[in-house]
Amino acid sequence: MNATITYTLTERAQRAQMAATGQPVARKQTVTVDLPADLIAHQIVKVSPDGIASVDLTARTGYQRDGTISWEGYSNWGSVGGDIPDANLDAVELVRTRIAEAEAASAETIRKNTEADKEAKAKRQAEIEQLTSIVAAFLADPTARGTYRDNLYIANRQIGSDVPGYADAVAAVQSRAQADKAEAERLKAEKDAAESVKEKSKLDFLRGGIAEHGSDSQRARSADGLLCRNEAIRAMEDVTFAAVNGVVYTKDSRPSCDCSNECCEECEVTHSVNDGVDCLTESEFAGLTAIKTSVAGATFVLRTHRAVHDCEHDDCRTGDNRAVMVKIPVGPFLLQREYCL
């Protein structure tokens, strides 16, 4: 049976043929040959409804990952064929060569992918054995935790559904998460209850103190539950620290910068305070002694206040002074007030 075979020459083959014949030669060649019966029956040969057979070798022949050959054209997995390098090659042999190349490429693809699949399966099996141990250890340890949000993670490893114990592990992760949530809610409720009791104790103490030491207005407002908490605490502080022999440290007590640089006059002053002092002068120590002897049951924290100009002048000096924070426990409160030294 006659068939039309179409193929494309390489540029080099085209030039060589033109040099040999002295005639123009097209790169795209079409020849009609008598194909053997085995080729006529092959998929590479297309027969039109009117019985005309043809073979198109201008396009590459593709093959899929599973080895399936796409005789009708290119595949994104791989392909063989291309331009013909010799114009004198037999057209029938070109067809046989294309078939052989495609079948060889298909067979090699199947071999490589089979080996790759075997390696992947072996690797996954080894991984599954390791993950199985992780799952077993997780299930055996009630304190262990994992996460499950579409995917299961235990010990920072993703556990697939093909791992033995997967379903049990998912159930354990979820039940332990629910138990943890319930325990957290219980602890929060206990803490809230304890805070409520503590707060009630403080309010009761403040009401008692205001009833004994507050002004008429404060007692009336406290009785109606309308006295501001800060005002009540300040009233308790006034009573508690009334006997302290010292001057209360206020904003006006803060030091100023000891600076003679006129350029610093417009610089902003930054104040800071730190617990602790390097030393005390004679008068400061006398003030501390007077404060300590005037109140019992108190603790004392020495503090250093500093002032500095927020500038970069080399001859700018800081200013500082010292104070003492007096702390006295009164009922459920630890009241404190700072005094100058």
Image (spheres, rainbow, N blue to C red):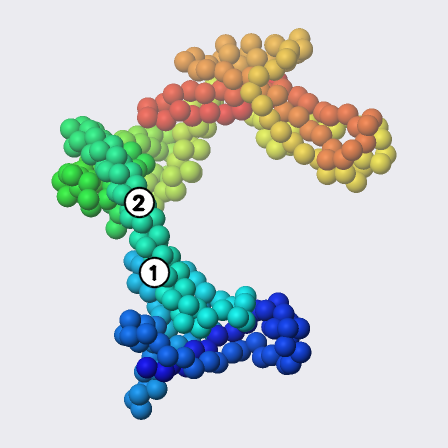
Residue 264, x across and y down, in percent: 81, 35
Q: Earlier in the sequence, mark 1 or mark 2?
A: 1
Label 2 SS: helix
Q: Is residue 146 shown to the viewer in this render?
A: no
* Left or right of residue 258: residue 63: left
Q: Which mark is residue 219?
A: none
* Whether residue 230 is situated above or below residue 248 in the rendered picture: below
Label 1 SS: helix
Q: Is residue 161 shown to the viewer in this render?
A: yes
Outermost residue on the right side: it is: 262
Residue named by callout 1: 103
Rounded to the nearest angstrom, the CA distance separating label 1 from label 2 is: 18 Å
* Whether residue 98 is situated above or below residue 135 in the rendered picture: below
* Whether residue 29 is situated above or below residue 296 in the rendered picture: below
Q: Which mark is residue 115?
A: 2
Rendered residue at 59%/30% (across/down): 250
Q: Few, some or many C-alpha atoms within 10 Å of disc 2 (few <14, some 14-19, many ≥20)?
A: few
Q: Exactly how many numbered labels are in the figure? A: 2
Residue 162, x across and y down, in percent: 19, 44
